Image: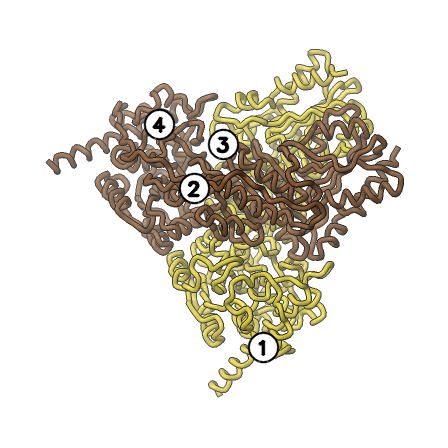
Chain colours: A brown, B yellow
Amino acid sequence: MEAGRAIEDHERWTELGQQLRVDAVRAAAAAGSGHPTSSMSAADLMAVLLDRHLRYDFDEPDNPCNDHLVFSKGHASPLLYALYRAAGAISDDELLSFRKLGSRLEGHPTPRLPWVDVATGSLGQGLPVGVGLAITGRYLDRLPYRVWVLCGDSELAEGSMWEAFEQASFAQLDNLTAILDVNRLGQTRETRHGWDTGAYAERLRAFGWHAIEIDGHDVSAVEKAYEEAVATSGRPTAIVARTVKGKGVRAVENVNGTHGKPLDDPEAAIQELGGMRDLTVRVAKPSESRIPHRFSSAGPLELPRYQVGDKVATRKAYGEALRALGAARGEVVALDGEVSNSTYSELFAKAHPERYFEMYIAEQQMVAAAVGMQARGWTPFVSTFAAFLTRAYDFIRMAAVSRANLRLAGSHAGVSIGEDGPSQMGLEDLAALRAVHGSVVLHPCDANQTAELVARMADQAGISYLRTLRGATSVLYEPGTRMPVGGSKVLRSSDSDQVTIVAVGVTVHEALLAADRLAEQGVPARVIDCYSVKPIDRITLREAADAIGRIVTVEDHWPEGGLGDAVLDALADARPGPRVVKLAVSGMPGSGKPAELLHQAGIDADAITDAALSLAQAP
Amino acid sequence: MEAGRAIEDHERWTELGQQLRVDAVRAAAAAGSGHPTSSMSAADLMAVLLDRHLRYDFDEPDNPCNDHLVFSKGHASPLLYALYRAAGAISDDELLSFRKLGSRLEGHPTPRLPWVDVATGSLGQGLPVGVGLAITGRYLDRLPYRVWVLCGDSELAEGSMWEAFEQASFAQLDNLTAILDVNRLGQTRETRHGWDTGAYAERLRAFGWHAIEIDGHDVSAVEKAYEEAVATSGRPTAIVARTVKGKGVRAVENVNGTHGKPLDDPEAAIQELGGMRDLTVRVAKPSESRIPHRFSSAGPLELPRYQVGDKVATRKAYGEALRALGAARGEVVALDGEVSNSTYSELFAKAHPERYFEMYIAEQQMVAAAVGMQARGWTPFVSTFAAFLTRAYDFIRMAAVSRANLRLAGSHAGVSIGEDGPSQMGLEDLAALRAVHGSVVLHPCDANQTAELVARMADQAGISYLRTLRGATSVLYEPGTRMPVGGSKVLRSSDSDQVTIVAVGVTVHEALLAADRLAEQGVPARVIDCYSVKPIDRITLREAADAIGRIVTVEDHWPEGGLGDAVLDALADARPGPRVVKLAVSGMPGSGKPAELLHQAGIDADAITDAALSLAQAP
C-alpha cells in the first residue's frame, strides 16, 4: 500500500511537473516573450508543493489561514500562472493571455491577481517580503499559515536576501521555507557558485537556517525536504535544490543564453515534454479556520496636544502621535531601522512592544517587512532618517506596484540637522517620494500639524511619506486644527500682499520671520505652509498666483523635484503665469549649526526676505 | 632584545590608543556633538594599524602606492581625525574645529580631506567601496597597496556588506582587510549578535573569508592579526575584534544609551584616560615607488556611426560607443549587474575583458566598486536597467557627497519596454537622478546622439546619468552631430509655430509624428529634443516660450520630477509665463506592446496631437 501510494505520488508529481513546463512554454510562446527556461527548472519543486504541502483556498484568497506563496524570482511568472491553471484558478484561455494588454497575467506577478500578495520582478525582494509575511503570521496574526518563497540562485547576490536570511533566523521563523532553485545560469553567465549547492547551504547554516541540499528534479527528495521543513522548529528552512535550467527540453536544457526568451520551437518542446496535459490539483485548504489575533484598543484616538508657542521637534510629535494611534488602533504597527530614539518611534515601542519590530540597520528588509504586514491587513509605519530611506528606494518603488498601503516617516530632513553633515541629511527625499506612483508626501512644520497628519496617514491608501525635522520648531497651530491631505495653511494674508512665500517644514518658520521683516519694509507678504507637497493644494496656490503673481518657494531640499517643482507644476496653466523664484539647497553642505547651514544654503529668513523684495520690486 | 622591543611596542600602542581616545573625547567636547564612544572602541585597533601596518605618505596623498584606509563606520570620525593628528597631518587646533562651519573635519568624513577617498556615514557603504579600491589595486592599478576598512558591527545588518563580502572573496582580494569593531552596542540597543564574534566569523568563513577573532584591546593580538592578514593569500581577511564601546572611561564603558553623544564630563574622562598626549607617529611610507598599470589605447576615438533612418536601440548604441571609448581610452572601465546583454555593456566586455567587471545582481556593490575605481583615477561606466539603479540610490547619493566622477547608464526606460511590466520599467529615474547634487541627466532619442553623449560623459565631472531605450528608434541625427551637455535640438521650427512640443527619448519620435499631423491640420508645431534634462537648455526653451508661449512636455516617466518639471523650472521667470501642459505616465502600467502602452499612458503621438491642438486653440 505505502509503496503503491509512493509510486502513484511520484508519477503524479512528475506528470504535474511536465504539465507546468508545457504550460510555461505555451504561455511564453503565446506572448512571444517571457521566461520559460527559468520556469522549467523549478517545475518539479512547485508541483510537489502544490499537490502536497500548500494549504490554500483558491476560492477564498482572503482566508486568513491560507499559506502564502511568493515567487521571489518573479520572472518565473509562467510557472506561477501554470500553477494557477493546475489549481483550477484560471482557465487555459487566460493562461494564454500572458503579457497581453489588459491581462492580469503580467510579465511579472502583481496583486492584480487575488492570489498574489506582492509584486515581484525586482530580484531580491520576494524573500524579504516573505519574511514580513512570516513575522506577521507568527507575531501579529498568530496563525499557523506557512510562507513558501521560491528564490532564484542569481538573486542571492542581492544584499537584501542576506538581510532577510539574518532577520528570519533571528526571529525564529520556522513558518518560513525558502526554496532555492539553483539552476546555475543567470541572464548572461554562470552564477558565482554555479551548482555548488554546498556554498549556499554553508552560508545559510552560518546565518542560522536549516538547509537541505537536494536534487530539485527528484520529486521524492523534494517531498522529503518539504516534510523536513515543516517539521523543523525554531528556525527557517532553506531547500537548496540543484536544478537544470530549461529542464526537459534538450534544445535549452542547461544552455547559456536561453534566459528570458520563448523557445524557438515550442511545438517540438511540448512534444518532447510529453504533450499538453489537463491535470487539476485539488489544492488542500487550510486545515483550521481561525481568525487572526487582534490587539485591543484603549479607546478613541487622543492625539497629543501642544501649546502654541512651545518648541517641539516634529520627529518627537511623530513618536507621540504614533504612540497614541497605537493605543487607539490595534492594527497599527511600527518598524524602525535601529534609530528609534532619533525618529522617536521608541515611544511606540515602549507603549506597544508587541507591535514594534526592530529591523536593525537593514532598511530594505524593513520596508519589505512592512509590505508583508500590510498584505495581511496590518497598518505599518516605517521610520528611519529620511536620508536612509533612499537605501530602500527600489523597495518603495515596488511597493507601489504591489498596491501596498505603506506609511513611511523620514526624520532629520535637510541641512537643518546641523553638525552631522550631508551623509545624514535627507535632501532628495521629496523628489524621490513624489516620483512614486500614487504617493502622498507630507512635510509638517509644527507638532500639532504632525500629529494630525500621522492620524490621517493611518487611513491613507497607497504609499504616504511624512518628513520630520530634527530640531525643535515653534508650535504654530492650535491642537486639533484640521490638516487634510492635499491642503495647505495660509499663515499670513492681506488684500495688499505684494508677494507670496510658499514654504514647508523648517522654512515655514523662516518665511514667517521674513514676512515680519518685509512688512516692516512696507512689502506685505502672503505666507503659505504647503505641508501637503503631494497632492498639493492647487486651489490655494492658484488663488495666490492670480491675486499676486509673484511667488517665492523655499525648501530645505535640493532644487530638483521638491516643493518648488510641485508648485510650478500646480501653476503650469495659470493665466497669466506667475513669476516664481525657487529657493533651495544648491551647494553641497558641510557641518555647522542649523542656523548657519540654513543661512549658507540661502533658505533662511535673510534669503527669503531678499528674494521676496527683489521679486516684489521687479517690473 | 626581541622581548624588549615587544614591550616597547606594546607600551607605545597602548599609549597611542589612549591618545586617540583622549582626542576623540576632546574633539566631540569641542563640537558639542559627535561619536566619541564609537571611536574609543576602535582606538587600539587603529593605533596598531597606524604605527605598524599602514603604508601611507601623508605629504603625498596622491602617491599611487599609498594604502587606503576607509572608515566604513564613518561616525567614528573623531577617531579618524585623531589618527590624522597623531600622524602629524593636522594640527591640534584643526582637530578642535571638528563639526564647525567651514571645517573640513565634518561630522562624517568626506574627501574634502585629501586623505579620505570617499564619504562615509551612511552605514554599509565603506566596505563595498573598499572592495572597489581593492579590485582596483589588484586588477587595474596592479599595485601592492592594501585596503583597510574599519567596520562597525551594527552595519553588518546591511545587505550591502554581504554583497561586498561575497564580491571580495570571489575576486580573491587578499589585499583587503576588514576590521570589525564588535563593540556590541548599536544606537539604541545591543546588536543581534552582541559579543558573539563567532557568529560573525562563521558567516565570514562561509563567505570565503579568512576570519580571525581577537580581543580588540589586546594590542599584541591586534598586531598578530594584522600580520596574519598580510600573510594570507588568495582571500580577504576579516579581523573580528571584540571591543568595548566607550572603552577607558567608566561612565560610558559598555553602557547602552551613550551612542552619538559627547561625554558628560570630558575633563574627568581625559583625566581617567591619563591626560592629553602628544605622540607623533612616523607613518611608514609605501616601500615601493611604482606607477599604476595603464591599458594601452588603440588610437583616437572612433565612435560608431549610424545612418539616418535606420532603426537602432539607444541601449545598443551605448554599448557600441562604450566599446569605442574603451579602445580609445585605457582608463575607461565598465561594470554591469548581470544584464550586460540587455544594456549592451557586453560589447565592451568582449572587446576589453580586463576592464569589464561583472558585479552580478548586486547593484549597491556595483556602484560602490565604481566609486572606489574613480577614487583611483579610473573612468567607470556603470550599467543596469534604469529601474534597478533605484536599488543603489543611497550609494549614488553618497557618491555625490564623495565628489565622485561616476557615469551611470540605465536601460529599459519607461513603459516603452512593453511586455515585461512595471517592475522592469524605469519611471522614476529622471526624478531620482536629477535630485543628486551636481548631476547631469541625459536621455538620447537616437543612436548617434547616444554615441556622442557617451563620449561627453567620459570627461564629465560629477555624476552623470544616461537613460537608454529598450526598443529600436529611428536615427534622426547625422553621425558626429554635436550634442553638448546642457544642449537641445530643435527638430521642427517655423515662424508661424503655434505650439511647442518638448520631448525626450522615445517621445521625441512620437512628437515628430504628432507635428506631422498637426501640420496637416494647419497647426505648425515646434519640436524640441531636450536630451539634456539636467542641465537643461534654458535658452532654447525660453526662446520657444517667448515666441510661442504654449508648451507641451511629454516624457515616458512619472509626472513628478522629470522632464516636465525641469522645463517648468527653466521657465519659472519667463515673462509672460508660458502655458505648459505636461504629458507623462500617470496610471500604473501593466504588460502590453510598447505602442499599446505608450498609447494607454497618454504619451504617444495621438495624445500629443490632442494636447497640442487643445493648447493651440485655448484662448
Give percent across and percent down for residue A470: 64, 51
- In percent of the image, x 58 and y 53: which residue is there? A342
- Report x, y in % for residue A518: 85, 42
Q: Residues within 10 Å of mark 3 (few under 14, many from 20)?
A: many
Alpha carbons under labels 4 and 3: distance apart: 20 Å
Q: Is residue B47 visible?
A: yes
Mark 2 highlights which residue?
A295
Q: Residues within 10 Å of mark 1 (few under 14, many from 20)?
A: some
Q: Is residue B204 left or right of residue A46?
A: right
Lower sequence index among marks 4 and 3? 4
Residue under disc 3 on the same chain as residue under disc 2: yes
- Which circle marks residue A403 in the picture? 3
Asked if marks 4 and 3 touch (Cβ < 8 Å), the reply is no
Task: For marks 2 and 4, give the one nearer the viewer.
Answer: 2
- Same chain letter for marks 1 and 2: no
Calculate the distance from the C-alpha at mark 1 to the C-alpha at mark 2.
50 Å
